[in-house]
Image: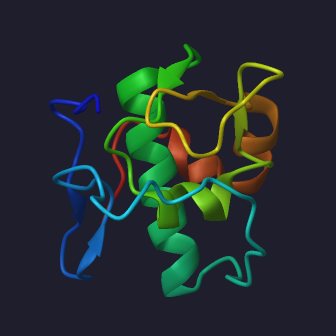
């Protein structure tokens, strides 16, 4: 499992993690699109925006490996702001390639593309 060095471990003051420390010995948590109920301005929306900000400023528009990124966080963006790179995407693989759909992400989370994200 690729560990994304320099990627934030979570959102300060919330207890929400953005990365995992080690592979799950019981099996990989699958990546799947989950419904997002967070409304703009809510705490949940800010957490999603902060995670997307970290993804954008770490990877930009380039494809990236799932690696140690937290599945729960990815699932809330998957299929919208974060999409698979390959047609034969394996949701159970730590090596699966993803990318940010910049057009959708900028529409849904414009604050994530600012140079500084205030927590």
Above or below, 42 relative to 119: below
Q: Assign the N terminus to one quadrant of the image.
A: top left
Which sits in the foreground, 109 or 3? 3
Give the image's coloring scheme. rainbow
Above or below, 102 relative to 49: above
Residue for point 49% across, 60% down: 29
39 vs 59, left or right, is right
Which sits in the foreground, 44 or 98? 98
75 vs 86, left or right, is left
Residue for point 57% across, 86% down: 42
Residue for point 79% across, 49% down: 80
- The percent position of residue 103, horizontal first and vertical second, equals 80, 32
As drawn, which residue projects farthest toward the front? Answer: 26
Residue for point 45% across, 70% down: 47
- The percent position of residue 73, horizontal first and vertical second, equals 49, 62
Q: Quadrant of residue 7?
A: top left
- The percent position of residue 119, horizontal first and vertical second, equals 30, 67
87 vs 108, left or right, is right
Which sits in the foreground, 10 or 113? 10
Above or below, 96 relative to 109: above
């Amino acid at each position: 499992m690729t560990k994304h060095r320099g990627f934030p471990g979570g959102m300060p003051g919330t207890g929400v993690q953005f990365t995992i420390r080690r592979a799950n010995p019981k099996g990989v948590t699958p990546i799947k699109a989950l419904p997002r109920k967070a409304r703009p301005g809510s705490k949940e929306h800010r957490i999603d925006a902060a995670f997307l900000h970290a993804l954008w400023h770490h990877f930009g528009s380039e494809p990236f490996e799932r690696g140690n990124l937290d599945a729960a966080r990815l699932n809330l963006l998957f299929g919208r702001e974060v999409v698979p790179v390959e047609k034969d995407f394996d949701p159970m693989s730590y090596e699966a390639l993803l990318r940010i759909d910049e057009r959708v992400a900028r529409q849904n989370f414009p604050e994530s593309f600012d140079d500084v994200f205030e927590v």
